[in-house]
Image: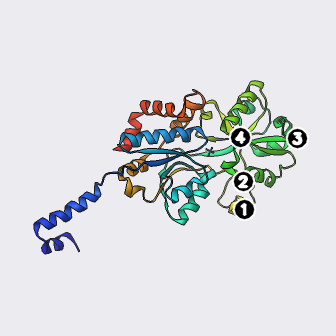
Amino acid sequence: MNFSKLRNKLTAGAFALVLATVAGQAIAADSKKPIVIPTHNWSSQVVMAYVIGGIFESMGNNVDYKPADSQAVYEAIRLGDITISHEVWQSTFGKSFYNAMAKGGVIDAGTHAATTLEEMGVPQYVIDDNLCPGLPNWEALKNCKDVFASADSQGKGRWLEGPQSWHGDLMPVRVKALGLGDDYVVKFAGGADAIWAELASAKKEGRGIITFNWTPNFTDAEGFVFIEFPEYSDGCRVADGGDGACGSPKGWLKKAANYKFPKTHPAAYTAFSKMSFTTGQIGQMAALVDVDKLSHQDAAKKWLADNEAVWKSFTM
Ligand code: TMO
């Protein structure tokens, strides 16, 4: 029934009430219930959690922060225990995100401007000093195991992978699938800080090192060279039915939300859907912690103070 037909059946007063109700729904205020934002174990994600929380608070919303496993978080969002995820990295978390979405309860809340890569690589000086001729092509690794050996690598070259919670056995499987198993071994770092500490000591000694890293990150500024493996394609990973002999995707960085978020917090959801950070902005959030050594909270406060024009536009 359209409004003119409805109007014929109603008194003027009743019609006004219908209109007010329709309008009232359109401008319903956000719930006072806290928006639950997860924190994980790499710097840009934690800083961005507090950045986004600060933006929500500036709009009058309440916010809670909850430390969460970076794979299990999508199921937690689906069940409503956590409201959003603001850094869904395609390579590491795309599968968990889409699995939760397929079960129902998680929505895609848009894509950041930054594109991503999560990959093994070497510091710039390894290339500049030609420590392993032929890099960044992966096949050069066949002749360089000694360059990348470490005290704990049993005479093999070492790939220093991130914590196992990010990637599972993706890299050990890849080493074998590429035929590098006799020459290289994967070691898992306890946390991101352990990777940065190893990179710093290798640099001091001018020594070869291969680590997992990603962009956007604070290392973009100094120069980090990702190894070029056989190109990623849908289905090339073992978890997707392939043999695993491929690199990581040049990927997207998405945002996820519980499906009720647009209804319970329409203003905050609208702002969240507009939020888009660039490679430079995300690298900066990480650098405030990993280079400038601010706490995550102070880094977020500084970022918000320095970038008001950027984030205010998301709230309008
Ligand atoms: C999920 N991470 C950005 C650490 O690769």
Q: Amino acid at mark 1?
A: Gly
Q: Earlier in the sequence, mark 4 or mark 1?
A: 4
Left or right placement of residue 268 versus residue 210 in this view? left
Q: In what element is the residue under mark 4?
A: loop
Mark 2 near mark 1, Cβ–Cβ under 8 Å? yes
The label shown at residue 190 is 4
Number of the front mark, 4 or 1: 4
Number of the front mark, 3 or 2: 3
Judge the density around disc 2: few (<14), some (14-19), many (≥20) Cα neighbours within 10 Å: many
Of the 4 image quadrants, the one containing the N terminus is bottom left
Q: Give the residue drawn at x 86%, y 45%.
A: 183
The label shown at residue 246 is 2
Tell me the distance, in whole angstroms, between the alpha carbons under discs 2 and 4.
Answer: 25 Å
Q: Residue furthest top?
A: 204
Q: In what element is the residue under mark 3?
A: loop
Q: Amino acid at mark 3?
A: Gln
The label shown at residue 154 is 3
Badge 3 residue CB within 8 Å of ligand 1: no
Of the 4 image quadrants, the one containing the C terminus is top left
x and y, in percent, of residue 76 in the image? 54, 56
Tell me the distance, in whole angstroms, between the alpha carbons under discs 2 and 1.
Answer: 9 Å
Q: Which residue is disc 1 drawn over?
A: 242
Viewer-proximal residue among 17 and 228? 17
